[in-house]
Image: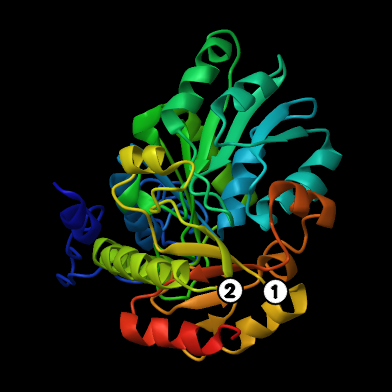
Amino acid sequence: MKFGTRAVHAGQEPDPIYGSVMTPVYLTSTYAQPHPAEPKVPGHDYTRAANPTRSALEANVAALEGGAHGHAFSSGLAATSTILQLLKSGDHVVAGDDLYGGSRRLFERVYRPLGIDFTYVDPSDAASVGDAIRPETRMVWVETPTNPLLRIVDLDAISNVCAAARATQKILLCCDNTFATPFLQSPLAHGFDVVCHSMTKYLGGHSDLLGGALIVNDDELAERISFLQLAVGALPGPLDCFLALRGTKTLHLRMERHCDNARRVVDFLDAHARVKTIYYPGLERHPNHAVAARQMRDFGGMVSFVLDVDVEEAKRFCTRTKVFTLAESLGGVESLIEHPPSMTHASVPEEERRRIGIDDGLIRLSVGVEDIDDLIADLEQALPA
C-alpha cells in the first residue's frame, strides 16, 4: 500500500467486539486473567507490558517508516534516552553538533556523567563523522534536517563512511527523523538501524500530546528496546496513543500543505531587506540542496532565518506576530515562532551556540497549514521596518 493508505489503515482493524472503525482507547492498567500467569491475550497482563491502543500506534508508525518494529514512548526524549540505555560506561557516541537542545542536554548532563563520551561534528560533512569514529564508538546520532539550522545529512554517505568500522565493531546508526517525518524521508532505507521521532510534533500534528517513537528492523534490537519499555516504563498513556493515531491518519495531507506554505514564506523572506540569511533546504543556494532533493520527497515545513537586528529586537519581533504563536515545539497545524538562542537552545553554552552558527538574531518558524496570505501578512506587519 502507498503512504496515504498506510497512514490511515496500518496497524488498525475494526474492533472485533463492536466493530468500532477507530481503535478504542483502552484505559486500563491491568487485565483479568482466567488462570494465574495466563493472560487472556498473550503479553497483556499489565499495560506497561502491552496495551491495544499503543500496539496499534506502534504498528502504524513502523509501517510508515518501512520498519519491522515500532516502539512508543512518553516523549521524544524518552525515546532518545532509551537508545542511550543500550550503551555502557566507556562507550563513545558521534553526534551532530547542530542538535535539538534537549538532546544535547540529555547527552551532556545525564549520560556523560555516567561515563559515556560524546564527540560533536558537522553532520552534513560525512567525512567528519567517519574521522570521529574511535574503537569504542558504539553509536552515531544525527538529525536531518537539523535543528535549528536545517542542514541536511547525507544518510547514504554516513552509512558508507561508517561501513568499515561497522565491519569490526558494533555501531548503531540512529537518525532523528522528527523534522522530515516518514512522509518526506526514510532513514532505514539508507542503511540506518534506528529511527527516532518526537511524536509530539508532526506525527501527532495538533499540539495536544507528548510522545516519542523508535522504529527498527533488527529483531534482536527490537527485543532489547521492548525490554527497556517494560523495565523502565517511559511509556505513553492510551489516550496519547489514540491522539497520535488520529494524527498519523492525516500526516500526508498536512505535510503537503506545510511544505507548500513554507516555500511561500521563504519567497517572502528572501525579498525582505532586514533578513540576512535564510536556512531552508528548498533554496537552490542551500549548501545541501542537492542532497535534500535526492533524499527527501519535499523540503519540509520548518524555516529558520537571521534578522539584521540585535538580540533584543529579535525577541521583540517574536512578540509582534498575531497568527504565528510565540511558543516552543513545532509540527502542529498552527504556525509557531520562536527565538532559539533564548528558548529551545538556551541550554547550549553560548560559545558553542556561536561556534555552530546560532546567531543572536536567529528566528525559527514552524509553518502551519493556515491560509498562506494571512501568514505572509502577519510576518510583514511584524518585521522591523
Q: Nearer the viewer, residue 351 or 277?
A: 277
Residue bearing mark 1: 309
Please give the label number shown on residue 124. Answer: none
> For the residue carrying disc 1, how many other residues have a C-alpha within 10 Å: few (<14), some (14-19), or many (20+)?
some
Q: Residue furthest front?
A: 273
Closer to the camera in the image, 76 or 156? 156
Image spot of residue 253 (x, y percent):
24, 66
Residue 274 is tagged as: 2
Say if 275 sits above or below 36 in the image. Answer: below
Q: Which residue occupies the foreground of this view, 271 or 51?
A: 271
> Picture coordinates of residue 300 (x, y %)?
38, 58
Task: Name the quarter where the C terminus is drawn.
Answer: bottom right
Point 35% across, 45% down: residue: 185
Secondary structure type for disc 1: loop
Inspect the image, locate mark 2, and give the three-letter code of the amino acid beneath it. Arg
Q: Mark 1: which amino acid?
A: Val
